[in-house]
Image (cartoon, grey):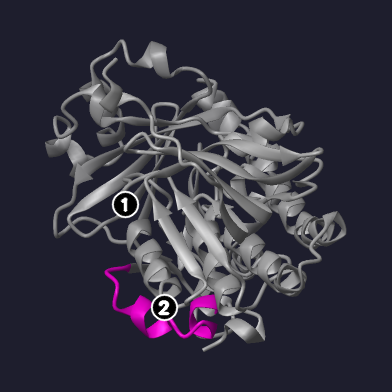
């Protein structure tokens, strides 16, 4: 290897008060809020930009309220978006309306569908206005730094091959369900079985197609299609672990199975040209019994990976970030942050996590598992679970899941120091 190709290690460590690893919605919200409190905060994002397709793009009422409180509501409203007020649950008996957001109080009685990169750019631009905020793109945390058992920062590597260290009073891992820092910390994860994985792909959208979110049930597969104006961002649920076997068939066969129950897609069967256009999401539902170590806190999917059912993972992670900022800003400013402070974050956010994961696991077991196991006729002949039947017969009850999904069990609001 030529000398010029060798990684270049910086001679001295950098220093910050709070180091946030992961520039997703939770990481960017936390960075913005702490910076507005005057905390010196650095956010690391391993990619060069936020342009990743097939990310969850749902922005729920709690997050819309938060953006208003932060003075970003008007800018957010300018972003290209669509609004969803009814949520359907694909079942063997057809699509059951499972949530009615129009019954929610407040100005945001809908879920906004916005490309996640636009939301992240908005948050990053706002955070950059704060003198204590630093965003480091193309910088990946690769390991934790420890001093006598306490986490004191991370080792990093840049896209250019530079390596170095950043020391911090507190390191927050918001680096997702495959968290490098969670692995480095050796934290035990409690996994819950899931019956599904998800394929993401695009289909062209025509002007006379349905609008908003479309749920379909076809050939033992539940399908959710998200309206992106000129294309459908399509999520197809498959049996857990069946990805490799199913990819031995022509990709057009998979698309044709969807068109069987949606004839308006028949002319687009060949739009997905190869399996390279179909991305796999390994669905996990897990939770850390303990979200922290001395000097380290995990939030969002790093602490509790969520199923895509309900599209609540992003917004739950944002709520984690808001609670973290409210509870930790003062001890960070005072230089006194300790494990007791970190434990307060977990106690605050544990109940919402338990409720959402409980609902997801129920729907996995009672609605999706029979169909995804290939037992289509049996599933159709089996009664739907009682809560689903109630939603179907009595529309009033649809406000309950709408509230749980849209507002959450414990809504978090921007602390006074972050409001504009």
Whether residue 336 is visible here, answered yes or no, is: yes
Between 4 and 325, the residue placed more toward the observer is 4
Mark 1 or 2, which is nearer the eye?
A: 2
| Residue name at image x 49 percent, y 42 percent | 11
**Number of numbered callouts drawn:** 2
Tell me, for residue 323, which label it has, or none: none
Image position, residue 129 (x, y; %): 41, 78
User: Is residue 244 rendered to the left or right of residue 354?
Assistant: left
Q: Is residue 373 above or below residue 191?
A: above
User: Is residue 334 rendered to the left or right of residue 19?
Assistant: right
* On-image quarter of the N terminus: top left
Tell me, for residue 129, which label it has, or none: 2
Per the image, is 110 magenta? no
Q: Looking at the rendering, which quadrant does residue 267 occupy? A: top left
Q: Which residues are magenta?
A: 66-81
Q: Mark 2 falls on what kind of element?
A: loop
Crowding near pointer 1: few (<14 within 10 Å), some, many (20+)? few
User: Is residue 364 rendered to the left or right of residue 249?
Assistant: right
Farthest residue toward the front?
11
User: Is residue 410 rendered to the left or right of residue 100?
Assistant: right
Between 412 and 146, the residue placed more toward the observer is 146
Image position, residue 218 (x, y; %): 38, 33
Q: Looking at the rendering, which quadrant does residue 250 occupy? A: top left
Between 379 and 315, the residue placed more toward the observer is 315
Per the image, is 75 magenta? yes
Distance from disc 1 to disc 2, alpha carbons, whole Å, reads: 18 Å
Which residue does the numbered mark 1 point to in the structure image? Answer: 49
């Amino acid at each position: 290897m030529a000398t010029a190709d060798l990684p270049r290690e910086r001679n001295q460590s950098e220093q910050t008060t709070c180091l946030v690893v992961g520039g997703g919605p939770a990481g960017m919200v936390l960075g913005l809020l702490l910076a507005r409190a005057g905390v010196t905060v650095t956010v690391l994002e391993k990619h060069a930009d936020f342009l990743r397709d097939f990310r969850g793009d749902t922005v729920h009422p709690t997050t819309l309220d938060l953006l208003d409180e932060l003075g970003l509501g008007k800018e957010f409203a300018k972003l290209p978006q669509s609004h969803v007020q009814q949520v359907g649950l694909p079942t063997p008996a057809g699509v059951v309306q499972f949530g009615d957001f129009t019954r929610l109080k407040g100005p945001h009685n809908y879920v906004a569908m916005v490309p996640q990169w636009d939301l992240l750019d908005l948050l990053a631009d706002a955070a950059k206005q704060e003198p204590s905020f630093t965003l480091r793109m193309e910088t990946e945390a690769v390991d934790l730094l420890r001093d006598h058992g306490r986490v004191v920062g991370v080792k990093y590597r840049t896209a250019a091959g530079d390596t170095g260290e950043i020391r911090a009073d507190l390191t927050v891992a918001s680096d997702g369900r495959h968290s490098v820092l969670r692995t480095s910390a050796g934290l035990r994860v409690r996994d819950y079985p899931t019956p599904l994985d998800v394929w993401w792909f695009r289909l062209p959208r025509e002007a006379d197609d349905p609008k908003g979110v479309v749920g379909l049930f076809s050939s033992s597969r539940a399908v959710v299609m998200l309206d992106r104006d000129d294309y459908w961002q399509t999520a197809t649920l498959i049996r857990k672990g069946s990805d490799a076997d199913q990819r031995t068939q022509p990709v057009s066969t998979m698309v044709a199975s969807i068109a069987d129950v949606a004839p308006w897609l028949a002319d687009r069967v060949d739009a997905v040209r190869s399996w390279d256009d179909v991305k796999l999401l390994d669905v996990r539902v897990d939770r850390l019994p303990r979200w922290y170590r001395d000097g380290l806190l995990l939030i969002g999917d790093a602490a509790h990976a969520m199923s895509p059912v309900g599209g609540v993972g992003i917004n739950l992670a944002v709520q984690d970030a808001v609670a973290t900022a409210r509870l930790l800003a003062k001890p960070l400013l005072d230089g006194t942050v300790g494990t007791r402070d970190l434990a307060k974050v977990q106690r605050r956010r544990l109940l919402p996590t338990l409720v959402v994961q409980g609902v997801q696991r129920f729907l996995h077991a009672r609605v999706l598992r029979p169909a995804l196991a290939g037992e289509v006729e049996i599933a159709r002949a089996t009664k739907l679970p009682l809560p689903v039947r109630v939603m179907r017969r009595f529309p009033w009850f649809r406000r309950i899941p709408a509230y749980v999904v849209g507002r959450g069990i414990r809504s978090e609001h921007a602390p006074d120091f972050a409001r504009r």
